[in-house]
Amino acid sequence: MKLLKAATVFTLGILVGQTLFSASSSGPSGLEVAIGLLAAVAVIGAATCARKHVGLAVLLLLALLGIVRGAVGSESAAAFQWSDLPRNEERVTLEGTLLRDPAASNVRTRLRLHVSVAQDEQSTTAYPVDVYTERLHDRIDATRRSDDFRYGDRYRFSGRFLISTGATGRGDTAGTIFTSSVELIETGGGNGLRSAIAGYRSSVSYFLVDSLGSKTGGLAAAMLVGDRTKLLPETIDDFRASGLAHVLAISGLHIAMVGGIVVALSAWAVGRQKQLYLIAPAMAVWGYAAMAGLSPSVTRAAIMFTVYMAARLFGRQRSVLPPLALAATVMLAIDPEIISSVSFQLSFAAVLGIALFSARIAAMGSDWIESSRRIPSIAKRPLVGIVYGMSVSLAATVATAPLVAFYFGEIPVWGIPSTLLLVPALPLFIGGSALVAVAGAVIATPIAAVGAIALGIGNYMSFIAETFASLPLGPVDAEGWSIALIAGWYGVLVLMLNRRLVSVKLGRVYDAVLRIFVRRPGARKTVARSGKSRYAYTVVVIWVAAAASFAGLALTDTPSQDLTITFFETNRGDMILVETPSGTRLLIDGGDDSDLAVQNLESVLPPLDRRIDVLLSTHPDADHLGGLQRIVERFDVGTIIDSGVPHDSAIYESWTHLIDEFAGDERVITALAGVVVALDDEIALTVLQTSCTLVECSNFNDESVVTRLDFRDVSFLLMGDITSSAETDLLLTNQRVKSTVLKVGHHGSRTSTSPVFLNAVDPALAIVTTGIKNQFGHPHDEVMNRLYEQLPEEAVYVTRDRGTVTVTTDGERVWVETER
């Protein structure tokens, strides 16, 4: 235990040094350091000469060294000069290199870019800038997706430079720039290994999302490769509200869990007689750490777990505290600032919890299984393996729970029960996600069977988060009493670890009290209680719930014999999905929000099914084209029908580049009047108009693609953004405009849906696609009054008010369902 004492004293010295000199940015003076070291040397020298209290003197020296190291602190990066920065709110164009993983920030991605400034011909300095952006443009790497930001990339960006000063500034960055897109001008910068890992992580992350969908795929990307930019905002909100936010970031909890489970499985497979079973856990942990990007927090956790493995390898597993303390001390000596790092504390607590508690928990569960007469003999060994694996999760959770509560500033009422229900399923989810990633390295196309495990467990995890987030009693403010909570929690754990010793001590006290007050010795009557654990029952219940979620994948509806048209609610613009009885899918436009477009599709498509047979772009405006780029990147798109209308915008340029690279010329056709797309035996989409022929078009919107969808006696007229001028042209060219359902033109603009045209269409239903974020006030009152004059109010549906509108028909009758 001498090593443990030395490590503890040095760590306490660092804490004291940081506390004493925190107010001074310059730290201790040289004279102060010299006096302290001379005093320490004098004390230890005197003790050594006298051969008395040498151990105490060494501890004193370590404490003083810790104080000095804590006071001096870490070597900080070279400070930039304020004169190097642009003026506040100056519009600038800069170039910077991404040397840190990108971070999600609402609908944008935050990039910490290092901008170099030449001081003279031989030296340069750099300052960090936070750039908040949405996408890439003018990519030199044609295979990159529009939101694929990687470590080592160099970007050119423009915007208004906001200097980070004052209460609102970030202390670790020089300024902030908000821009819609950045230009990728160079790749492979920074550390070569990290750059290569970043490319691999990006590929795995996108394959997970493509295979498992945005919701489960985002979870898989976060927990397997540490990419939290793929998480949906609602997923983050649910996990925070339910006290599960710590699960989303790879930390010591995940590293210790993966390593501990591989230890259990390896020991179960090859036995513990030889130490070969310790090789697999070490390889698994470092492989997992590499997949997570070898970030400082993940690397620290991997080092701690490796030290723990080394202790077991050399037969020191019963005294694992000293080597773990040594590992932590070495890291603190290198960088004292990490002692206040949340990730460092979580990593240490997780590994320590596994070392101290997992074996005890597993022993209780396995003893119960082995002694149970209700469990068949053939099932006992697999159940014991499961219990050993789950004991790792529970041990890490118990050890890290108070730190999670403290650092998040609040304690969710349901945080502990939700964690205990979710974390045991986490290893299987990570394993299932890894299986999908491995399959992706071999087969480019996602396979449903491979992703079924991850999708089923992911559904269970999302269900747990959503359920606890919806329960009453919100988070409790942890300020003021969270320190006491941590002390009390760990105090209870210490008592549990030493319960026999505590029991003996308390027994002696009890006997002494009896002798004093009863004045006669008496033997305490102890009641033997069964130590049978119910932990196995908990594991079984959790796995049954996860299996039920997995089984839900097979309970999909049988193919419908009806035609279904879904008019999605978007922020702005059109997005329409057509699904025929035979399963053919046609997507018309994608709205303005790429993330929302993906979520809309995933909300109606079966799990693991990413097929879009035909994609039609009716107009190059952003409220029609904005979401399609992400759809082409994320889904298996067959044929693309483009409007063929050029437009001077970054979105359109990116779109044309994308369809050329991803789809190829043979899969892209241009919409022309008279083209008929046979979607099914009785279902056809006809292009009625792409521009005016007899009437002069009034504006750019009149070049929208107008289509008609026919199924037996029911028809849909989809008007795009055309105005009354193009409507007149449709009538003069004798197009078949009379239809059952009218998708009102240009989102209900006053320049569209003229009375003459509305009378010619004579619809039974009217759908107005417009969102709450449209800045033009669509739909206009004049248009709504025209619709109400011809149709009853219950036959007019506005997506802004009713949400997504779904129209189903068997070719004779029509049914309408709304989201609200």
Image (tube, helix red, strand yellow):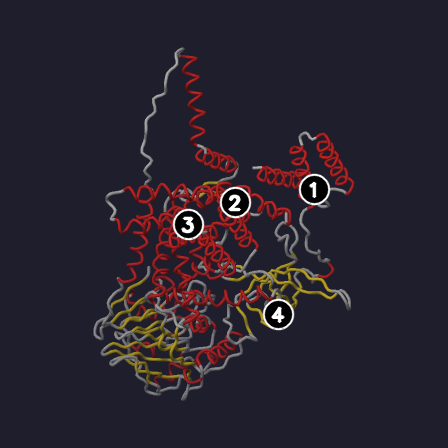
Q: CA distance from mark 1 to mark 3?
A: 44 Å
Badge 2 marks a residue whose secondary structure is: helix
Q: Is residue 671 left or right of residue 298?
A: left
Mark with earlier residue (4, 2): 4
The mark found on residue 68 in the picture is 1
Report, in whole angstroms, how far the alpha carbon at label 4 lies from the one at label 3: 56 Å
Where is residue 522 shown, x and y percent of the image? Answer: 37, 16
Few, some or many C-alpha atoms within 10 Å of disc 4 (few <14, some 14-19, many ≥20)?
some
Pair 1/3: label in front: 3
> Residue 156 bears which disc, if any?
4
- Mark 2–mark 1 contact, CB under 8 Å? no
Residue identifier under label 2:
407
Closer mark to the observer between disc 1 and disc 4: 1
Q: Earlier in the sequence, mark 1 or mark 4?
A: 1
Tell me the distance, in whole angstroms, between the alpha carbons under discs 1 and 4. Answer: 43 Å
Residue under numbered circle 3:
272
Label 1 Cα neighbours within 10 Å, binned few <14 / some 14-19 / many ≥20 = many
**Mark 3: which amino acid?**
Arg
Label 4 vs label 3, nearer the camera: 3
> What's under tag 1, amino acid-wise?
Val
Note whether 23 is above or below 112 in the view shown. above
The three-letter code of the residue at mark 2 reads Tyr
For image coordinates 43% across by 34% down, the residue present is 496
